[in-house]
Amino acid sequence: MADVEQKDTVIVGGGPGGYVAAIRASELGQKVTLIEKGEPGLGGVCLNVGCVPSKALIAAGHRLQQAKDSSTYGISKTDASIDFVKTQDWKQHKVVDRMTRGVEMLLKKHKVEIIDGEAVMDSDSQLRVMKTGPKQFMDNDNGRVIKWNNLILATGSRPVEIKGFKFEGRVIDSTGGLNLPEVPKEFVVIGGGYIGTELAGAYADLGSHVTILEGTGSILNGFDKDMVKVVEKNLKKKGIDIVTNAMAKSSSQDDKSVTVNYEVDGKEQSLTADYCMVSVGRKPNTDNFGLEMTSVKLDDHGKVVVDKQGKTSVDHIYAIGDIVPGPALAHKAFFEGKTAAGAITGKNTANDWVGVPAVCFTDPELAEVGMNVEQAKEKGIEVATSQFPFAGNARAVSLDEPEGFVRFIYTKDKKNIVGAQVVGPEASTLAGELSLIVNCGMNVEDVALTIHPHPTLNEPIQEAADVALGLPTHI
């Protein structure tokens, strides 16, 4: 039997939550050991096969469309084309690899011990680290046995596979969608959430004809309908077909295409495409590393039950990121990692999921933070709204992106801002200021008195506050 190693703070998983927790814990004086099984690798899903590479493809698609037609600006149309092999090479080596090397460098800078291998829980106080990769012969290696003073679980999530659509060949998950060898002529996306809608728009810009099959009555559920309507308009302008209330039933494929069978209003239909990407959600990785050998409690959705500091039902074990309740967002995991590291050190840290910005990199982008009107009503809060259109913003008009608006949700009595929403150009960037406004409990007068530079895309934030005060300038 292997010797037992005693460690200070052990972190399982090197994704957004795990590596940030490791850095913060080290900064706070802890000796940190990070266990990463190598797939997807340091940086996790987000950096390797998720948020970051998807934004690279979205950017490439935008560049291609601009090169094909910038006649609005008086620039003559040219016959632009794309070498997708080069695009994928740039995405992988100049974007993803560069950022993952940066994560590794930061961990080494903070003297974090990195162990390559897969963690398997033995009990509430012990785990083993097993070798990963194919094993040609059976062996008696029981792995490295590790005990800890504190443990942070950051094992992430994986795509949900649905019946009739096994991930193989031309039926792919979002990882496969980001790594296609060519731009498909026909591309079917099952699921109109964040991931599906973002990649549908990206591939439409790259030259695909895309069909989105969404099982509910609308894509991008969770965002207000008037926000989604702006995005839908642009998706259709790109030639994307959106089929709602469509239930995917089965698929069949050969070496050149895949046929997708689905049902709408009781009628069976089918589509044939080069690839079918299934993006109907993600499943927390709480079922694949021996968590049942511990006393850590899970909720009905398979997520780890934690308190405001990320502490589980077992003392000295914390959990963060996609495996705990709340939205599965990298920036939420960043914050939770810092919170858990601080809690271990004895700091009075706490997570606040109300102030987590939700962003979707569609065209135009969507972002929201805090409560919407319905959520406020459910909490018994009387609210009003104010909004300002990008059509009244000089910067948006000069970029030829005048669609969308900024909206505040604020209390009727004191005009305190409890929520903010934006659909329009660079909504993802504006979300940072909106998050600050909501988290600080600012009222509309605070925002109205904050001078914003002109001409910029964040002026509508101030203008929406002016509207709330009944003193609009540019509408």
Image (cartoon, rainbow, N blue to C red):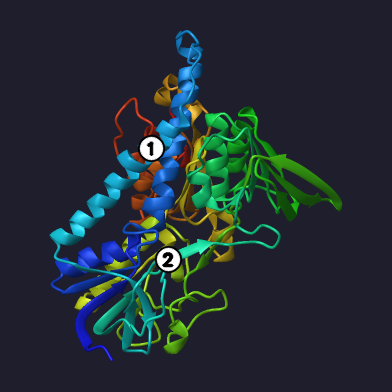
Question: Residue 343: x, y in percent?
Answer: 26, 76
Amino acid on which the number 1 mark rests in the picture: Asp
Rounded to the nearest angstrom, the CA distance separating label 1 from label 2 is 26 Å
Task: Left or right? Give the position of 30 relative to 242.
Answer: left
Q: Nearer the viewer, residue 135 or 312?
A: 135
What's the residue at 18%, 67% (across, down)?
Answer: 112
Q: Which residue extends farthest front?
A: 137
Q: Which residue is mark 2?
A: 156
Q: Examine the rendered structure and indicate whether residue 19 appears above or below residue 404.
A: below
Question: Residue 449: x, y in percent?
Answer: 31, 40
Quarter of the image that includes the N terminus: bottom left
Label 1 element class: helix
Q: Which residue is mark 1?
A: 89
What's the residue at 34%, 63% (across, down)?
Answer: 17
Q: Indicate the quadrant where residue 291 lies.
A: bottom left
Question: Residue 403: x, y in percent?
Answer: 53, 30
Amino acid on which the number 2 mark rests in the picture: Gly
What's the residue at 61%, 61% (across, down)?
Answer: 161
How many discs mark residues in the rendered view? 2
Question: Residue 383: x, y in percent?
Answer: 53, 54
